[in-house]
Image (cartoon, grey):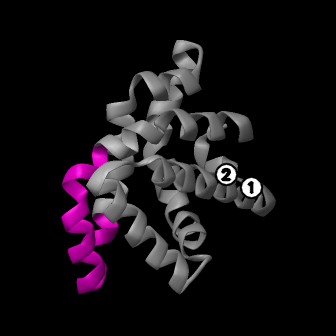
Amino acid sequence: MTLSDLIQEQSRKARIVEDCTKLIDQQVAAKGGISGFALKAAYGVVKGIDASYIAGAISRLLPEMLHALNPLWMEGIQAGNPVDHLVQQRSRTADAILAVTDARAKNANGIVRSSYGKLRQSVKGDVEAAIPGLAEILGKHL
C-alpha cells in the first residue's frame, strides 16, 4: 500500500487531517523566543479569521505531500520500518514536504507568497522537528 492509498477513504483522510492539525497546533505552541512569539501571533490570526483554515490547507496539500513522501516510505518498508526511516531521514523527509509547499507558494497570491517567503528560510528546522509526529500519524493510519 502506498501512502497515497491512505486518503482514498474519506473518513481515514479526515482522521489524518485532524491528527496533523493537532500536531501543528502542538508544534506552534511549543515554540519559544521572539520567533516563536511571532509565529504564534501569525498562527492565531489565521485561526481567528477561519478556524478551519489549517485543516483545510492540510487537506488540500495532503495528496501531494503523501505522493512526495511515498519514495521515502517505500525505502522504509524495504529497511523494515517506514516510520523509523522517515524519522532517521528527517532532513530528506522535510525537503520532500517543503518541495510541495514551495511549488504551491509560487502559484499563490502576493500576500501568501510574500509571507511564505519570509518564513521559508527558517521553517526547515520546524518541519524536521515535526517529522517524528508525522511519521507516527502515518504509521498509525496505515
Q: Residue at x 54, y 21 (%)?
A: 84
Q: Residue furthest right?
A: 11
- Label 2 sits on residue: 19
Q: Position of residue 13 (x, y in %)?
A: 70, 58
Residue 132 highlighted magenta (yes or no): no
Type of secondary structure dominating the magenta stretch: helix
Kind of residue at badge 2 = Asp
Q: Is residue 124 left or right of residue 44?
A: left
* Between 10 and 98, the one nearer to me in the picture: 98
Query: Which quarter of the figure has residue 113?
Result: bottom left
Q: Residue furthest front?
A: 33
The N terminus sits in image quarter: top right
Local SS, label 1: helix
* Between 48 and 100, the one nearer to me in the picture: 48
Q: Residue at x 35, y 55 (%)?
A: 36
- Label 1 sits on residue: 15
